[in-house]
Image (cartoon, rainbow, N blue to C red):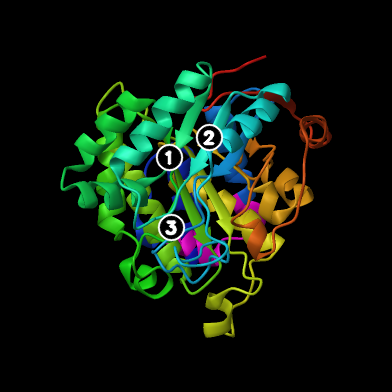
């Protein structure tokens, strides 16, 4: 069978929402034309979302601390606990940031941590309870699988018990942070002290069994191969298949290109080629095609810019995520795009869609 016929048959299979294999995914990714991929991904988007709506959210990123022992070569934000730059956000600072969030119409903070050697599970429980006590309407989209693995090991308890305790303290949903590429050969080179691929997946599986709302992510465009990107997608899809019936599992997938400005990763691997706009659009389409069981695909306007993100809305994406009132990590590595609520809605309309504000559970708020 010719490659052309194979591509046609694989795309037909994908259009029926049938899972394609890793080999089929690699063939599409490397051989299919961009126009073919965009067309099929857009048709699949319409199967999930038959209207012309594109969702977005108002929330605020807040970093609990900039101290982290994971040693990720792509992160310019972290420092050691002995650094003069080291901090732990105070309750008073949270109050100020949350007040601004509420003034702008949002009610959720994306609370990102680091693997701080001096902070254990009880610290996060106390923090979550205090934030919910002070701000009862606040939603906590917090931590991620690497922190769950780290805190559970530190406390000597299971991932499930760690999550149960955090949920009791106020955790509302779990971001898919720290996935990078779910291939250990890559992880051992770019984030040697962070959880393994299987640990990330296992922590997420426990979250799914507890019916936590979760997302999945990918950071692409560094030392990984195209085949490894597909492997990552297949692992995400297979984990989604394992979620108990009636639970939410992964509601969205969010890929973004590696931001390399002044990072140790770029200094170590000098021949890294940045992801182009065309490359990113192609990957968004592939993600929609491979992830036949995840309803929402988000385009990362923060890292690729709004014009590329608008094209992604015709290539399988249906969500543009947050206006990002505050963001520190990828901004420290070169991402500098900005949007407010008005501009977010304008960009969606310019792309030919109706902007619909949502919450983390993808409930419509308007």
The numbered mark, 1 or 2, whose residue comes first in the sequence reads 2
Q: What residue span does the magenta drawing correspond to?
A: 26-37
Residue drawn at (53%, 44%) of the image: 89
The numbered mark, 3 or 2, whose residue comes first in the sequence reads 3
In-image side of 122 versus 75 (left or right): left
Is 97 in front, or is 138?
97
Q: Secondary structure at mark 2?
A: helix
Please name the residue that numbered disc 1 is placed on: 292
The image's mark for residue 25 is 3
Residue 168: give x, y in percent of width and height: 30, 24
Q: Secondary structure at mark 1?
A: loop
What crowding class fits label 3: few (fewer than 14 Cα within 10 Å), some (14-19), or many (20 or more)? many
Which SS type dominates the magenta stretch?
helix
Please tell me in which quadrant of the rendered image residue 192 appears: bottom left
Residue 121 in view (yes/no): yes
The image's mark for residue 278 is none
What crowding class fits label 2: few (fewer than 14 Cα within 10 Å), some (14-19), or many (20 or more)? few
Residue 240: give x, y in percent of width and height: 33, 39
Residue drawn at (64%, 75%) of the image: 262
Please name the residue that numbered disc 2 is placed on: 91
Residue 91: give x, y in percent of width and height: 53, 34
In-image side of 106 versus 149 (left or right): right
Separation of marks 1 and 2 at Cα, in angstroms: 42 Å
Is 117 in front, or is 217?
117
């Amino acid at each position: 069978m010719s490659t052309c016929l194979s591509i046609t048959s694989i795309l037909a299979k994908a259009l029926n929402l049938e899972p394609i294999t890793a080999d089929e995914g690699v063939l599409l990714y490397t051989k299919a034309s961009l126009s073919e991929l965009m067309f099929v991904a857009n048709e699949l988007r319409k199967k999930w979302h038959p209207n012309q709506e594109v969702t977005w959210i108002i929330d605020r990123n807040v970093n609990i601390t900039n101290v982290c022992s994971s040693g990720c070569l792509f992160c310019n934000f972290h420092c050691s606990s002995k650094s003069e730059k080291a901090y732990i956000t105070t309750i008073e600072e949270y109050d100020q940031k949350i007040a601004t969030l509420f003034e702008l119409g949002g009610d959720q903070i994306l609370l990102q941590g680091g693997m701080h050697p001096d902070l254990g599970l009880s610290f996060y429980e106390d923090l979550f309870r205090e934030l919910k006590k002070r701000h009862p309407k606040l939603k906590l989209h917090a931590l991620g699988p690497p922190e769950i693995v780290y805190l559970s090991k530190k406390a000597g308890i299971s991932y499930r018990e760690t999550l149960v305790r955090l949920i009791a303290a106020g955790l509302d949903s779990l971001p898919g942070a720290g996935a990078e590429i779910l291939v250990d050969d890559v992880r051992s080179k770019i984030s040697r002290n962070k959880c393994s691929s299987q640990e990330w997946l296992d922590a997420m599986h426990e979250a799914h069994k507890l019916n936590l709302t979760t997302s999945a992510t990918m950071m692409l465009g560094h030392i990984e191969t195209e085949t490894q990107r597909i492997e990552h997608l297949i692992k995400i899809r297979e984990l989604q298949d394992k979620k108990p019936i009636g639970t939410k599992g992964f509601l969205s997938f969010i890929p973004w290109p590696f931001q390399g400005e002044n990072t140790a990763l770029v200094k170590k691997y000098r021949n890294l080629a940045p992801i182009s706009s065309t490359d990113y659009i192609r990957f968004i389409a592939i993600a929609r095609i491979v992830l036949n069981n995840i309803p929402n695909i988000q385009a990362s306007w923060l890292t690729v810019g709004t014009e590329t993100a608008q094209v992604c809305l015709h290539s399988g994406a249906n969500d543009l995520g947050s206006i990002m009132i505050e963001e520190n990590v990828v901004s420290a590595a070169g991402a500098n795009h900005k949007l407010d609520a008005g501009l977010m809605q304008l960009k969606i309309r310019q792309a030919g869609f109706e902007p619909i504000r949502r919450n983390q559970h993808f409930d419509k708020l308007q």
